[in-house]
Image: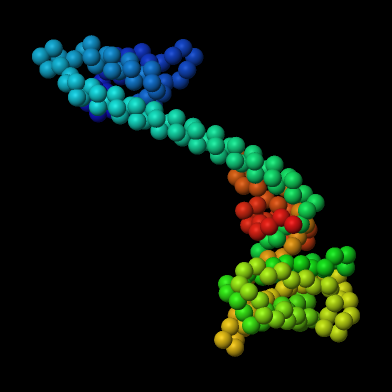
Amino acid sequence: MTNIDTSLLENLNIKRAGEQQKPRDKLGQTEFLKLMTAQLNNQDPLQPMQSGEFFTQIAQFSSVAGMQELQNSFQQVATAMFSSQVLQASAMIGRSVLVPGQGVQLDGAEPVTGVVELPASTANLRIAIFDAGGQMVRSMDLGQQPGGDVAFSWDGRGDDGEPLPDGEYTVQAGAEYDGEFTALQTFVAARVESVAVGGNGQGVTLNLAGRGGIDLASVKRVM
């Protein structure tokens, strides 16, 4: 603190029984008050501490104490928010969520579904499905679409109408603007199998079927 004679530290017994000595640059409320009292008792009678200096030191300590209380409050809020995230994530187990990406898993049981983000209305929205070898196996023209989220669904059949084998596929979307197609962000549906919590409260991860882990914050929608 400003104007506190730090040499007084050597004359004060601020070490409590059974506790280690605190670093001299980190004083608690009790230590600060002891220093203030000692400084008042040991000040030069011919040059006493001015009231302005005294209240400045009090204000400085109050500011530090207030910041500590604010930090503790933020920590409590952060802990509560993290606990809420864990509960929300746990409730997603067994449900499907929309997450960013292009990779999908065809299992023959359910159609592949997802959403395309359109920045503006388009004359034609096209969805293309590619197999693991990069060969396009299905092309779907969704026609004119307004801007915003546009849902799509693939039944697992190729352009010839025949069912395709189960496995990994890639979804790509493009919208026609000024006669040319522009690639767009896609979100695909995946089922949540489990939830993992990072060490020391560092993030919540959803483990998705056929996709692995993804951060909870990346989820666009719970279906």
Q: Position of residue 163 (x, y in %)?
A: 89, 76
Residue located 75% across and 77% down the image: 129
| Residue at the image point whose x is 34% and y is 27% from the top | 62
Up the image or down, 221 lies above or below 113; here it is above
Q: Quadrant of the N terminus?
A: top left
Quarter of the image for the C terminus: give it.
bottom right
Q: Nearer the viewer, residue 62 or 176?
A: 176
x, y (%) of residue 137?
Answer: 79, 81
Instruction: Name the residue located 24 percent from the left edge and 16 percent from the top edge.
Output: 39
Q: Is residue 134 visible?
A: no
Residue furthest bottom as drawn = 179
Q: Residue 44 is drawn in which quadrant?
A: top left
Give percent across and percent down for residue 17.
46, 12
Q: Is residue 109 visible?
A: yes
What sort of colour scheme is used for the picture?
rainbow
Q: Position of residue 121 (x, y in %)?
A: 60, 76
State the residue in front, 18 or 56: 56
